Amino acid sequence: MRIFSCQNCEQTVLFENTRCEQCSSSLGFLPDQMVISALKSVDNAWVALADTSIPAKRWYYCENHQHQVCNWLVEEGGSTFCIACDLNRHIPNLEKIEERQAWQQLEFAKHRLVYSLLRLGLPLISKKKEPEDGLSFDFISENNVVPEDVSSMTGHAFGQVTINAAEGNSVDREQMREDMNESYRTVIGHFRHEIGHYYWDQLIFDDEKNLADFRALFGDDRADYAKALEAHYKAPNAEWQQSFVSVYASSHPWEDWAETWAHYLHIVDTLETASDLGLSLLPLGSNRNGLAVMVNINPFQHENFEDILAQYMPLTFAVNNLNRGMGQPDLYPFILVPAVREKLAFIHRLLRTNLTRGGIQTNSQTQTGDQSQTSDQSQSSDQSQSSSQSQKSV
């Protein structure tokens, strides 16, 4: 994530901000220019100071801005929902305060995910436009009635990503982390993991070379998924650290891909922020075992993934130690062994060489009012590219 500034007063602002704390300018995100912009009110619309269009475009806040979950902008005459919110199918019951608060956390994480997908030039197609190959999100609360076509379990199936709304509640999420004996559980991690399943379908499944390269690194995806998970839960791989980023990654090649994909997004997003801040490490002593580094790589454009890791790893060591000094968990409590690094490098090469930049497609029609007040009691029986809530490292 980049660091943004208010164009009116140059105050540093955050990705989720809707108002500049210094000059009180309204702020909004321009997805076509990937920037937070100060806004000027004109004729019941907004002109974005960062917008270089001539004549100046008229912008409006996404319809979900009224719920304090989105600060993205839409163009006059287009959809009333931004390209991130347009991906929603079901959302929690907004009449319940706790569900609205949980949904806010889910949307903040999802918008950061969509930002990264746009930065990577990945195809982003709403199921409203492409029912077969498109993407949509269900945010499901177990306290409401569950539609027949909805699963209550966090997972993915054929482009439909489901996130249990309880993940947006920090207390519930921490309890689940302890129950699952996980070292790490975050909202953004869930999104990054599940979207990995979707892009496996988009990037690997129908490409003969990519599929062969995938199987050489991750294993044979044709292994029975249900049986693999059953075996994993009965007896997790005791030697997973030798080849996998997490124990859950060792359960099946699909889960190895999704876990590794999530960590790839962790790395590039964190490093972009560090680079934009101009962070550097100059430890006392003679280089202090390779910790000295100036973070100056744009990970979304740099070709060599080893260069990215060479800047990322010292950074995580430093921040992990800062966190420990404040009694906080490590920012990144993972060890990237050579086998994992090779898998990460494969994802990086895939994204650098096989993707058409700027191929973003979204539904141009106004989103229907079916942001339903839903929940879930049933688990989908479909095992194709679906993932369980437990034992993820993200």
Image (cartoon, helix red, strand yellow):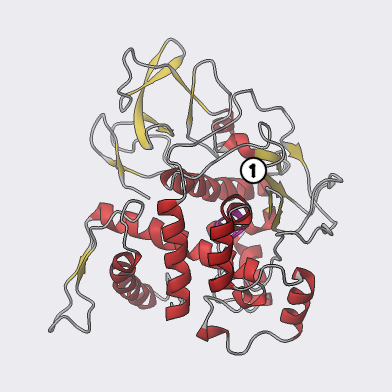
Quarter holding the C terminus is: bottom right
* Residue type at the position of mark 1: Leu
The residue shown at (37%, 45%) is 14
Residue 25 visible in the current orientation: no
Q: Is residue 163 above or below residue 360?
A: below
Q: Is residue 353 magenta?
A: no
**Residue 192 in magenta stretch:** yes
Side of 181 relative to 54 (left or right):
right
Q: Report the residue at 14% width, 80% height from top.
A: 284
Task: Name the one closer to the observer, 79 or 166.
Answer: 79
Range of the magenta residues?
A: 190-195
* x and y, in percent, of residue 342 in the image: 44, 72
Residue 363 in which image quadrant: top right
Residue matched to label 1: 135
Q: Position of residue 323 (x, y in %)?
A: 38, 73
Residue projecting furthest to the front: 208
